[in-house]
Image (cartoon, rainbow, N blue to C red):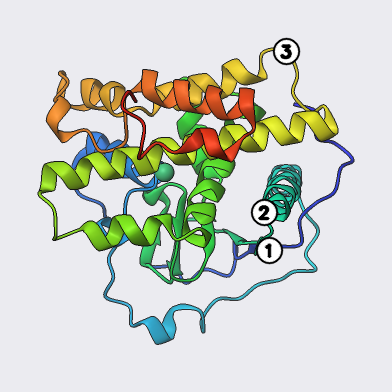
Amino acid sequence: MLWQGRRESENIEDTRGSGGGRRVAVGGGIGGVILVVAYLLLGGDPQALLDSTQPQSQVSANRQVDSNAPRDEATRFIAVVLADTEDAWHSVFRQMGRQYEEPKLVLFSDQTRSGCGFASAASGPFYCPGDRRLYIDLAFYRTLRDRFGAPGDFAQAYVIAHEVGHHVQNLLGISDKVQAARGRVSEAEYNQLSVRLELQADFFAGVWAHHADRVKQVVEAGDIDEAMRAASAVGDDNLQRRSAGYVVPDSFTHGSSAQRVRWFRKGYETGDLRQGDTFAARDL
Ligand SMILES: [Zn+2]
């Protein structure tokens, strides 16, 4: 992916090094950690997995951000990708006659407090609708490379674009509708809605790739394959096979590898939001 020398987003909050020391134990062994990582990567409700004992009022008060600190290469890369998503979504929202509101991206190491509760490195990347922030511990990219076999900068960019996709769903009121259905529908039906929400975030990630490539020609040969590998590596079926040794279709909440790849590709090829209504689609 061609990214050097391009605009970096101002919306990065680097909280690494300001941390407070306490490590959070995550149960379930390595399989459990992988599932938690994947769950959040795929945008599961962080509230369900994070320790939310921190009162909301303390959440942002303790965050220390040094916005003047020099950026290392990994951070500059993240900032360029975030800037790409800003440009892409400003353009898409303008076409809809709306104003895109940019999310913040919080870099943390080991642990952080979010508007959705306490997060540890094992939480993996996630989006918190409550404070409109993306959270990522860069150590996750090592996991993506070593444990999920999905290396490459475009795979890393896809992860951010997917989380930004959840932010877009938040702005468009889509996540709220799904949340509102919780409790009104059966668990199986709610899981179905979650799958469609996740696949739409993949579609939105594809829309970002479409716009970034059209405007800036950033996609190199092999990049889309990298993103596909990341998308398919973190599909539910793959994860369940790795953790439990078999696949349990009824408990899928984020879509199969094939479904994720299909929706990302559709977003990338069309760049057209109207093609991304996963909730109306008969075949996922
Ligand atoms: Zn997600």
Q: Label 1 near label 2: C-beta < 8 Å? A: yes
User: Which residue is tagged 3?
Assistant: 221
Which residue is pictured at 68% across the width and 63% down the height?
99
Which residue is pictured at 41% across the width and 35% down the height?
199
Task: Name the residue nearer the viewer: 54 or 219.
Answer: 219
Q: Where is residue 244 in the image (x, y as percent from the top left)?
A: 15, 25
User: Which residue is tagged 1?
Assistant: 99
Which residue is pictured at 43% across the width and 70% down the height?
130
Q: Distance between the residues labelled 1 and 3?
A: 33 Å
Residue type, numbered disc 1: Gln
Q: Label 3 near label 2: C-beta < 8 Å? A: no
Q: Please rate how many residues cluster around mark 3, counting C-alpha atoms within 10 Å: few if below 14, some from 14 to 19, many from 20.
A: few
User: Which residue is tagged 2?
Assistant: 93
Residue type, numbered disc 3: Ala
Which residue is pictured at 51% across the width and 84% down the height?
61
Q: How far apart are marks 2 and 3 (CA)?
A: 29 Å
Q: Mark 2 vs mark 3: which is more N-terminal? A: 2
